[in-house]
């Protein structure tokens, strides 16, 4: 059985958990990370020298990096509906997964850490404002894309790209900031919320 190492509150672990629900993969999960077993433990470092969650063990196969993991799961567990084999369709999915990691995630990181996690190290008002502005700009890009597709980020159908994007949308609504009017993002959030995997692992306890 697939084993997932990482605490369920981690956004990157939740990518893997949600993907497993979408693909119908049975799994076991162990709590690792802040508040649980330390990822600096030699046993964990032997699996991932970066000391980060998640890590999966699929039999003897060990893998880390959440976006790589969800792509692997889609390929290994008959997930072509989520991650199409056709090169152009797959590239469109990869484009939005990579955009989330390279553009959207860095934009919200400082503001979310300051305003939700309330880390004492993240108290620079100018940086918080800059993070919010960058985050809002990226969410406006997402809103235009969703308005164009009328459904999901890579097109008319739910794909693997909607998992990291959907988790970031959850963070957008969970952060106490002024949210610009983004009707396509609002509709997308409600659309995702009908999926059992998002209900269990995407909204992170939000009603």
Image (spheres, rainbow, N blue to C red):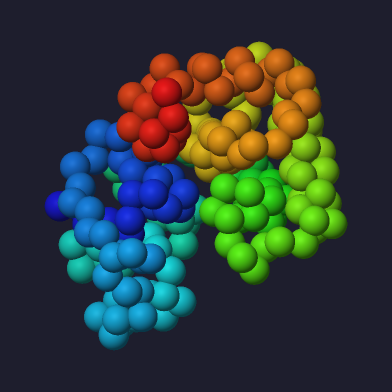
The picture places residue 101, in percent across and down from the top left corner, at 63, 53
- Please state which of residues 74 and 132 is positioned toward the viewer in this rendering: 132
User: Could you tell me which residue is drawn at 41 percent across and 80 percent down?
Assistant: 49
User: Could you tell me which residue is drawn at 33 percent across and 24 percent down?
Assistant: 196
- Whether residue 8 sits left or right of residue 179 in the image: it is left
State whether residue 123 appears in this view: yes
User: Could you tell me which residue is drawn at 38 percent across and 66 percent down?
Assistant: 34
- Whether residue 61 sits left or right of residue 158 in the image: it is left
- Whether residue 103 sits left or right of residue 198 in the image: it is right
The picture places residue 50, in percent across and down from the top left corner, at 46, 76
Q: What is the count of numbered marks? A: 0
User: Could you tell me which residue is drawn at 67 percent across and 63 percent down?
Assistant: 122
Look at the picture and state if 108 lies above or below 86: below
Q: Quadrant of residue 41 in the image?
A: bottom left
- Please state which of residues 74 and 198 is positioned toward the viewer in this rendering: 198
Question: Which image quadrant: the C terminus?
Answer: top left
The picture places residue 27, in percent across and down from the top left corner, at 20, 47
State whether residue 22 appears in this view: no
The picture places residue 165, in percent across and down from the top left corner, at 58, 38
Of all residues, the one furthest to the left in this rendering is 1
Q: Quadrant of residue 88 in the image?
A: top right
- Please state which of residues 168 and 26 is positioned toward the viewer in this rendering: 168
- Please state which of residues 115 and 3 is positioned toward the viewer in this rendering: 115
Look at the picture and state if 150 lies above or below 21: above
């Amino acid at each position: 059985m697939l084993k997932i190492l990482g605490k369920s509150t981690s956004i990157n672990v939740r990518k893997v958990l949600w993907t497993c629900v979408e693909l119908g993969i049975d799994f076991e999960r162990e709590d690792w990370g802040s508040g649980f077993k330390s990822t600096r433990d030699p046993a964990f470092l032997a699996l991932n020298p970066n000391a980060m969650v998640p890590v999966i063990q699929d039999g003897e196969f060990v893998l880390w990096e959440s976006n790589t993991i969800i792509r692997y799961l889609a390929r290994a567990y008959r997930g072509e509906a989520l991650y199409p084999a056709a090169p152009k369709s797959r590239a469109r999915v990869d484009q939005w997964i990579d955009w989330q990691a390279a553009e959207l995630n860095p934009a919200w990181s400082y503001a979310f850490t300051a305003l939700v996690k309330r880390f004492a190290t993240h108290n620079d008002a100018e940086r918080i404002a800059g993070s919010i502005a960058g985050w809002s700009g990226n969410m406006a890009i997402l809103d235009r894309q969703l308005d164009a597709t009328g459904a999901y980020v890579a097109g008319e159908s739910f794909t693997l790209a909607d998992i990291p994007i959907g988790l970031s949308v959850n963070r957008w609504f969970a952060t106490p900031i002024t949210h610009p009017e983004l009707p396509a993002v609002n509709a997308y959030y409600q659309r995702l919320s009908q999926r059992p995997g998002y209900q269990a692992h995407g909204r992170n306890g939000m009603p």
